[in-house]
Every structure is written in structure tokens, then in C-alpha cells.
Amino acid sequence: MDHILRSQFNHILGTGRFFVFLLVFVLSPSVYALSELNAKVRDNLYLRSSPAEDAESNGVQVVTDETVFVLGTSVEGSWIQVLKKSGETGWLTLNFVDLFRVDRADYDEYYYQLMRERRYNTRWAWNLGLSYGPTPMGIGAETTLHLNLAKRGVFDSNVDQLELASGIRYHLGADPKPALRSDGTLFNKPAEAFWEIPVFFVWLFRMGYRGELMIGPRFGFSVLKDSYNRFPTSVPGLTGFELRYFPVDTVGLSWNTWIQMRSVVYYQTSFDLSFRF
């Protein structure tokens, strides 16, 4: 009799462990796409920063009857990690929610929010590449360092980033338009190299699930040492746009246009490697 009871008990215990394993697997944070569960909150409360009674609030509030998406569970299964539609995440106990299956439209929306929330964010970016422009620029090289002033974006939602940038650009120069000698004949001055120091803002909008494609305007000014100008140093206004693509998190490609506005408008373009860290 003891042997039979022990066998039945082990069977029940094994079955219970299987269901606990199945629940943890289905709700595990490493397999978000498999959970497909929503949770309706029963009371007004704040999410926790970790799955523990003594964990501090992370400042994110959920209200009665609010629906959140389940990302995963704690090891013992009494806490769930949830995602709000606004993108914030946190932990709460199972005692405060009712679980139900998410519909397809909500699932797609939550999935996009999750990917947006987990986009790769950095404080610094460094561009290094080559440039070209018509007279008087010619072929050149540039390097610029960018400080991301808002790591999660101006709207605090990982959809944009505002950068303050500066660096140096060196131009080999291009033959200017023919000049007129005193005797009435035309001649071309030889090309002369010169430098410039741009200071500008870049406001990039992030697209794609990972935010890997970024595009936006730039505006500022440039200190230009142009030997072709009648003044040795000028400070033209600067505008244009920048496009970056990151096939991996830390290294990408950048295409830029530069328009320098003074008595004569200069146009340029550049192609860079972009490193972010």
C-alpha cells in the first residue's frame, strides 16, 4: 500500500512540476513571442523594479481594469513582468491580475512597443568618412563627434534622438571659376586645400522595429577657412540632413548632405562609417 501511495504521490508531484515548467516556459522573458497573454489589473498600483516584496517601485503606475502584456514570470511563478502600451515595463504579483489570451491586433501593438522599448541606445556617436562638393570644396575627409542629449529621445519613447555635434572637415579644394587677368585673358587659380569646423544639431527620427534606420535634419553653423573667399575666415549658416543605417548595434553607415548659406551657397555630401557607444 505504501508503495502504491508513494508512486501516486510522485506522479502527482511530477505532473505539478511539469505544469510549473510549462507555465515558466510559456511566460519566460526569453520567449516573448510565445506568451500571447494579457493581464487585466484589479487595482491601482505601481509596478516594481524586480520580482520581490521588498523591491522598490519603478514609478510606473497601472490602474484598475488596465490591460497590460505579460512578458514573463519570476522563477517561482508568483510575479509577472508586464509591458504597458506606452512602453514601460515592471513587475507585479499574480494576485492583482486576471490573465486572458491577447487578440492579434493587441499582440502586434505590444510587440512593436516591446521592440521600441528595447532599442539600442547610446550617448555618443562618431562619424568618419569622405566628402565631396563642387567648387571650391572638391574631395575631402571629415570626422565628427556627436553627443546624444536625450538618450531615450525628445519624447522619451525611443522614437528619436537629438545630438549636438562638432568636428573638423578638410577639403583638398577644387578649381574655382576662371578669373580675369588685367589684360582681359582668363585663367584658373590652382586648387588650394582648406578646413572648416562645423558645430550643429542633428534631430534623428528612428524607424524600424530595432530603430536601425535614422533620418533627420541638421542645423547650425560652420567656421570656414576658405582661401577662395574674400574674407580669410567666415561663419556661414549650416543646414542639411543625415541618414544612418545600423545593420549591427555598434557600427553603421551614414550619408550626409551639407548646405552652407552665405553670399554664395555651398553644397556638399559625405559618406561615413558611424560608430556609436
Image (cartoon, grey):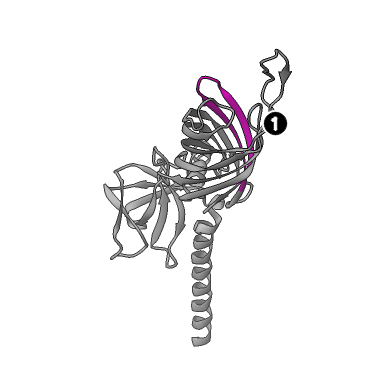
At x 49%, y 87%, the residue is 2
Q: Position of residue 212 (x, y in %)?
A: 58, 43
Along the line of sight, the residue nearer the viewer: 274 or 178: 178
Please tell me whether residue 20 is drawn above or below residue 227 in the rendered image: below
Residue 112 higher or lower than 21, as above or below = above
Query: Would residue 269 appear left or right of 74 to someone viewing this image?
Result: right
- Prevailing SS of the magenta stretch: strand
- 253 is higher (above) or lower (below) than 215: below
Residue 252, given in percent of the width and then of the height, sits at: 62, 46
Q: Nearer the viewer, residue 136 or 4?
A: 136
Q: Tell me where residue 186 sits by quadrant.
A: top right
Asked if the magenta segment contains residue 260, the reply would be: yes
Residue 53, x across and y down, in percent: 30, 64
Q: Picture quarter containing residue 214?
A: top right
The local secondary structure at tag 1 comes to loop
Residue 136, magenta (yes or no)? no
Point 55% across, 56% down: residue:
31
Check disc 1 and give the amino acid type: Pro
Look at the image and tell me whether residue 82 can be seen.
yes
Identified at 53% across, 80% down, the residue is 7
Q: Residue furthest left?
A: 44
Magenta stretch?
A: 252-273
**Mark 1 residue crowding within 10 angstroms, few (<14) / some (14–19) / many (20+):** few
**Between residues 103 and 136, which one lies in front from this camera angle?**
136
Task: Tell me, yes or no, if residue 121 can be seen here.
Answer: no
Residue receiving disc 1: 190
